[in-house]
Amino acid sequence: MTVIHPPLSRDQAVRRARLYNAATIGWNGTEGVIAVVAGLAAGSASLVGFGLDSGIEVSAALILTWRLRQEGRGCTQPSDHRAQRAIALSFVALAAYVAFESARDLATGSEPDVSIVGIVLTSLSLALMPILARAKARLAPTLGSRAAEAEAAQTNLCAQLSGVVLVGLLANAVFGWWWADPVAGLGIAVLATAMARRTWRAEALADTCCA
């Protein structure tokens, strides 16, 4: 028997979005520090980049936290639009960094050491982030927020980057294929650029507080 849950009210959606945001900030803050430290220890640019991506994800979550605080202060559309554009710029920053580091690794033939910490960390991220991204995305229509939708996409991109970094780390550890990660990193940079463009140009969803 299928249980049909009643739709969330706007207040419930806001509270849940704030909870997801707090979880994002806590996880990605911790993940970012561990990844950067492990990446520097192993000489892995991809793992350092993964850690910096976690920092960008935290910044996107903080932007959305600011957006959600505008609730109850009148129409949120102007705030949502500014937050949407700020998240788009974070995609640009991520794409630029990953592209630069990946191209440099390919050019120099940089071969990182094996990082067990990095493999475990990216595996956990790959398992958890898609679940969190889907939960966030389901709230966006109720919130009437492109910023919430864009931040959920940022979390989903973080999951994809986790998979790419994990494949690179495993390929290097098992087969010695040092080039696998930077090649896939260039693909992630292209994806991040596309997400930045789409987020910047997206029209705002209907804001229920203004309906």
Image (cartoon, helix red, strand yellow):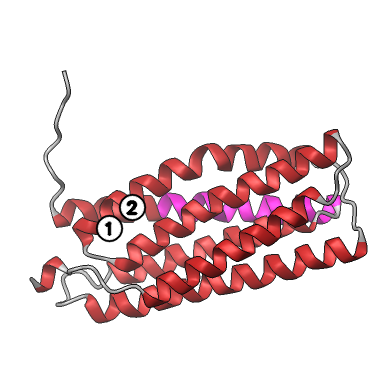
For mark 1, does the 10 Å Cα neighbourhood hold few (<14), some (14 to 19), or many (20 or more) residues?
A: many
The quadrant in which the C terminus is found is bottom left
Mark 2 residue type: Ala
- Whether pointer 2 and pointer 1 mark residues with C-beta atoms closer than 8 Å, the reply is yes
Instruction: Assess whether residue 26 is covered by the magenta stretch.
Output: yes
Residue 168 screen position, x and y as percent: 75, 45
Residue 130 vs residue 202: left or right? right
Q: Could you say which is closer to the camera, residue 207 or residue 71?
A: 207
The span picked out in magenta is 22-42
Query: Would residue 158 be visible to someone looking at this image?
Result: yes
Q: In this view, does 110 lie above or below 198?
A: above
Q: Which of 87 and 103 is in front in this view?
A: 103
Q: In this view, does 197 lie to the left or right of 107?
A: left
Marker disc for residue 140: 1
In screen coordinates, is 89 left or right of 118? left
Q: Residue 179 appears at what percent x and percent y?
A: 83, 51
**Disc 2: which residue:** 137
Residue 11 coordinates in the image, percent (x, y): 16, 56
